[in-house]
Image (spheres, rainbow, N blue to C red):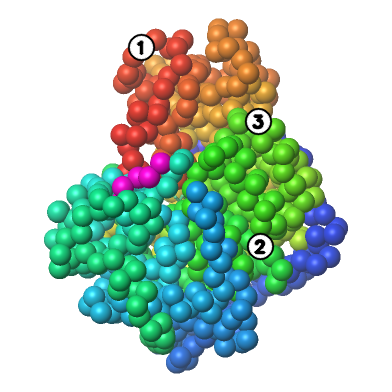
C-alpha cells in the first residue's frame, strides 16, 4: 500500500464475491439486457434534452406543454421550462383516467393491528377532501404546511392534498421534539400544521398534539392546526379559532377538487436535514423534475410489475418515504403496503408477519434495521413464509457485507436480488443502484449510476482522480430530481454544494470505483481517518469488524494521536459473548488479519448500543468526541450506554 496523495483514500478491504441476477428474475425484468441499460445510459448522457423530453412526455400528464427541457446556469437549474403539471394528478388521476382506479394504492396496517385498504379512486377522494378543507383554512399556492403525523394513510393524503393545490409540504418526523418543530415552522414560515392526537409506538400512545401545542406557542406564522383522531385519547385540548378536527372539516367535504395546473418549477416540498453547522437546512424540491425522477427511478430499480405488493419500511418523515412511499410508487400505479409502528411490536417478527400476511414481493429497508434483525435472532424469521419476496432493497448507509449476506440468505432465500441504493435527500431519488435483472451485485457496492447520473471522483483540488483510489464523489451534470436550493438561504446552497468543484455537485461522500466500474461509497468526507498519511474509510474497518461472529454493529472514528496523526477508535456492540479483554484482543487481531496492520484499531470499546440519528445513521461526530477524551465516565472496560446521548441529539436528521 502506498502513501496516498491528498484527496485519495486507501482502499483496504477486498470484497470480491459476485452475485449474478437469478435467471428466472432476469427473464421478466424491466431491464433484461446490459445492452438495454447501456443504450439508455449513453443516450441520457449524450443527448439529455432529447432523452428527458421523451421521458417527461411519456410518463407524466401535462396541462400545458413545456418548452426548453433543461435550463442550466450552475448552480441554478430549471427542468421542463414553462410546462404545467401536478404531482397529485400524476399519482392519482392519471391511473383513474386510464381505467385503473380500482387498483389498490395503499394497504395499511396500524401498530395495534387495525387495517385499511384504499384504491386509487378512494385515495383520490380522500386527497380531494383534505385539499378542499385546506383551501377553506386559507391555504393556497406556495403556502407552507407542516405535517407532523403518524404513519397513517392520512399522512400520504395530507402530502398529496398539498400537491393538489400547490401548497408546499414540510413533513417533520413525528419523533422530533417541540423545539425541532418550532425551528422548522419558523424557518419555513408555515401557515398550517397538520397532526394527530397521538401516535402508537411499541404499544404505547405518544401524545403528538401535546408536543404540537408546545411548539405552536412559539410558531407565530401558523394560523391553524388540523388534527386527526388516531389514538382517541379524550384529553386533547383544542384551541378555539386555531384547531380543527380532521373528521369535522375533512370528512365532510365533497372530495371532487380538480388538481391545480402548476408550473414545472413550483415548489413541491421542503424537507429538513441536518447540516454541518447544526442548523437544519430545508432542502427544496420542485414539481415536475422531482416527480419524474421519483417515478422512473422507482420503476427501473424496483423492476415494478402489475402484480407486485411493494413495501418500503421508511417513515414519510424522511426523503425515502417521500420518494419511495408516496411520489415514486404512486406515480407508477403500484400497490404499497404501509405500516404504522415498530418492527418489534408485539414481537420481533412483526415485519416477517406482515410480509407473509400481505404477500409482499418487494421489500425496501435500511441496514440499521437489518442489523437489528440479526441481533434479535433467526428464530423470528424462521417462523414465517417469506416466499412471496422477489426483490430486496437497502438504503440509508452502506450495508456491510455480513449484513448483506444475511439479508440475501435469510430473507431473500438466495433467490432475490438485492438493490443497494445510494442517494441523498438532496438528490430527490436513487442515483446509483444495481438494476436487478442485469447487474451482478457485490456485497457492499451500490454498483453503477442510473441513466442521467454522471458521477466523478475528485481530489481536494477538484481534479478527477485515478478511479481505483478513493476521492470525493461529485455529480457532473444536472438531473431532474436534484434539489433546487435551501429554503431561504440560496447563498448556503451555492456554497455548500457547488463551490468546492465549480460546476459539479458535491455529494459530501467519499467513493471509489473498482476495475469493473462499480462504485463503493466509503462514508462521509468528514469521516475519513488519516493514519500516518494513509486516508482510511471508516466503512471498510467497520465491515471487517462486522465480519466477526461476535459483532453486531461497529462504528469507527479517528482520534488525535501525536505520532500517527490519527489513531483508530472502534465502538462495537456484541452478541453471545462477554465483553472482556480476550474478545477485545481477538477483534483487533481480526481486523489486522482481514485488512492489515494499518487498519487495526488502537482503541476498541464495547457499547450497549451505538448513538444514532432518528433515521438510524451512526453519529460518528459524537463518537469522535468520546474517543478523543471528551467522554462521560472514564472506565473503558464497561459497556458504554449511548442511548442517553442519542436522545439528547434528536435533531440530527
Ligand atoms: C447519505 C444521505 C438516501 C435516502 C436516505 C438517507 C448515506 C445513503 C447509502 C448507500 C452508502 C449511503 C450517504 C449519503 N447513504 N444510502 N446505499 N450506501 N451510503 O438520506 O439522510 O440525505 O443521507 O446517506 O452518506 O450521502 P440522507
Q: Is mark 3 within 8 Å of ligand 1?
A: no
Q: Are marks 1 and 2 in contact (CB under 8 Å)?
A: no
Residue 380 drawn at (x, y percent): 66, 36
- Element on which disc 2 rests: strand
First in residue order: circle 1 vs circle 3: 3
* Residue reaching furthest to the front: 234
Q: Is residue 561 visible?
A: yes
Tell me if 638 is positioned left or right of 395 in this view: left
Instruction: Tell which circle, 1 or 2, labels the residue nearer the N-terminal end.
Output: 2
The answer to whether residue 500 is above or below residue 98 is above
Q: CA distance from mark 2 to mark 3?
A: 26 Å
Residue 533 coordinates in the image, percent (x, y):
49, 28
**168 relative position to 375: left or right:** left
Residue 413 numbered tag: none
- Given this view, does label 1 or label 2 mark the residue nearer the observer? 2
**Front in this rendered view, residue 371 or 376:** 376
| Residue extent of the magenta highlight | 204-208
**Which residue carries the number 2 mark?**
309
**Residue at x 34%, y 78% (from the top left corner):** 252
Magenta stretch contains residue 552? no
What residue is drawn where x is 60% and y is 84%?
Answer: 58
Q: x, y (%) of residue 198? A: 35, 51
**Mark 1 → mark 3, Cα distance in angstroms:** 32 Å
| N-term-proximal mark, 2 vs 3 | 2
Residue 267 can be seen in this image: no
Near mark 2 (Cα within 10 A), the count class, few <14, some 14-19 or many ≥20, is many
Q: Is residue 539 above or below residue 588?
A: below
* Closer to us: 160 or 211: 211
Q: Secondary structure at mark 3?
A: loop
Q: Residues within 10 Å of mark 1 (few under 14, many from 20)?
A: few
Say which residue label 1 marks: 634
Q: Which residue is mark 3?
A: 377
Amino acid at each position: 500500500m502506498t502513501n496516498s496523495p491528498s484527496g485519495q483514500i486507501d482502499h483496504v478491504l477486498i470484497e470480491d464475491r459476485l452475485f449474478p441476477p437469478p435467471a428466472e428474475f432476469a427473464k421478466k425484468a424491466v431491464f433484461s439486457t446490459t445492452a438495454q441499460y447501456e443504450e439508455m445510459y449513453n443516450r441520457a448522457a449524450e443527448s439529455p434534452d432529447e432523452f428527458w423530453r421523451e421521458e417527461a412526455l411519456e410518463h407524466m400528464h401535462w396541462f400545458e406543454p413545456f418548452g426548453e427541457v433543461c435550463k442550466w446556469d450552475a448552480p441554478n437549474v430549471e427542468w421542463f421550462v414553462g410546462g404545467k403539471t401536478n404531482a397529485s394528478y400524476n399519482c392519482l388521476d392519471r391511473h383513474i383516467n386510464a381505467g385503473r382506479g380500482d387498483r389498490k394504492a395503499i394497504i395499511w396496517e396500524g401498530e395495534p393491528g387495525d387495517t385499511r385498504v384504499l384504491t386509487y379512486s378512494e385515495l383520490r377522494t380522500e386527497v380531494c377532501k383534505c385539499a378542499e378543507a385546506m383551501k377553506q383554512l386559507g391555504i393556497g399556492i406556495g403556502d407552507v404546511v407542516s405535517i407532523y403525523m403518524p404513519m397513517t394513510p392520512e399522512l400520504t393524503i395530507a402530502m398529496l392534498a398539498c400537491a393538489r393545490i400547490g401548497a408546499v409540504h414540510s413533513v417533520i418526523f413525528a419523533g422530533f421534539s417541540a423545539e425541532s418543530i418550532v425551528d422548522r415552522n419558523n424557518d419555513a414560515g408555515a401557515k398550517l400544521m397538520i397532526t394527530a392526537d397521538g401516535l402508537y409506538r411499541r404499544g404505547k400512545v405518544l401524545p403528538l398534539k401535546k408536543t404540537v401545542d408546545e411548539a405552536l406557542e412559539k410558531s407565530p406564522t401558523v394560523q391553524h392546526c388540523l388534527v386527526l383522531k388516531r389514538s382517541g385519547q379524550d384529553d386533547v385540548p383544542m384551541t378555539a379559532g386555531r384547531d380543527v378536527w380532521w373528521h369535522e372539516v375533512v370528512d365532510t367535504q365533497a372530495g371532487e377538487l380538480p388538481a391545480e395546473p402548476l408550473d414545472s418549477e413550483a415548489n413541491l416540498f421542503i424537507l429538513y436535514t441536518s447540516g454541518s453547522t447544526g442548523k437544519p437546512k430545508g432542502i427544496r424540491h420542485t414539481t415536475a423534475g422531482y416527480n419524474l425522477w421519483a417515478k422512473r427511478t422507482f420503476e427501473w430499480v424496483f423492476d415494478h410489475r402489475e402484480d407486485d405488493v411493494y413495501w418500503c419500511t421508511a417513515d414519510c418523515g424522511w426523503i425515502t418515504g417521500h420518494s419511495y412511499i408516496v411520489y415514486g410508487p404512486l406515480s407508477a400505479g403500484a400497490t404499497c403496503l404501509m405500516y404504522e409502528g415498530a418492527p418489534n411490536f408485539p414481537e420481533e417478527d412483526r415485519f416477517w408477519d406482515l410480509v407473509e400476511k400481505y404477500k409482499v414481493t418487494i421489500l425496501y429497508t435500511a441496514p440499521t434495521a437489518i442489523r437489528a434483525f440479526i441481533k434479535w435472532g433467526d428464530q423470528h424469521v424462521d417462523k414465517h413464509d417469506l416466499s412471496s419476496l422477489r426483490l430486496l432493497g437497502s438504503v440509508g448507509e452502506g450495508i456491510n457485507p455480513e449484513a448483506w449476506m444475511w439479508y440475501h440468505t435469510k430473507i431473500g432465500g438466495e433467490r432475490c436480488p438485492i438493490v443497494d441504493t445510494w442517494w441523498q435527500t438532496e438528490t430527490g431519488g436513487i442515483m446509483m443502484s444495481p438494476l436487478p435483472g442485469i447487474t451482478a451485485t457485490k456485497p457492499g457496492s451500490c454498483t453503477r449510476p442510473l441513466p442521467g447520473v454522471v458521477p466523478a471522483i475528485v481530489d481536494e483540488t477538484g481534479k478527477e482522480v485515478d478511479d481505483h483510489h478513493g476521492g470525493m464523489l461529485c455529480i457532473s451534470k444536472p438531473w431532474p430530481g436534484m434539489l433546487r436550493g435551501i429554503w431561504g438561504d440560496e447563498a448556503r446552497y451555492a456554497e455548500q454544494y457547488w463551490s468546492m468543484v465549480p460546476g459539479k455537485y458535491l455529494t459530501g461522500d467519499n467513493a471509489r470505483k473498482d476495475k469493473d466500474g462499480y462504485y463503493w461509497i466509503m462514508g462521509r468526507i468528514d469521516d475519513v481517518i488519516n493514519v500516518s498519511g494513509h486516508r482510511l474509510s471508516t466503512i471498510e474497518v467497520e465491515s471487517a469488524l462486522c465480519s466477526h461472529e461476535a459483532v453486531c454493529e461497529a462504528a469507527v472514528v479517528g482520534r488525535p494521536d501525536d505520532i500517527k496523526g490519527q489513531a483508530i477508535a472502534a465502538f462495537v456492540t456484541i452478541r453471545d459473548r462477554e465483553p472482556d479483554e480476550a474478545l477485545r484482543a481477538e477483534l483487533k487481531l481480526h481486523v489486522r488479519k482481514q485488512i492489515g496492520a494499518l487498519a487495526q484499531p488502537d482503541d476498541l470499546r464495547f457499547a450497549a448500543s451505538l448513538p444514532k440519528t432518528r433515521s438510524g445513521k451512526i453519529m460518528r461526530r459524537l463518537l469522535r468526541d468520546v474517543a478523543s477524551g471528551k467522554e462521560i465516565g472514564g472506565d473503558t472496560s464497561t459497556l458504554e450506554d449511548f442511548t442517553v446521548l442519542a436522545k439528547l441529539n434528536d435533531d440530527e436528521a
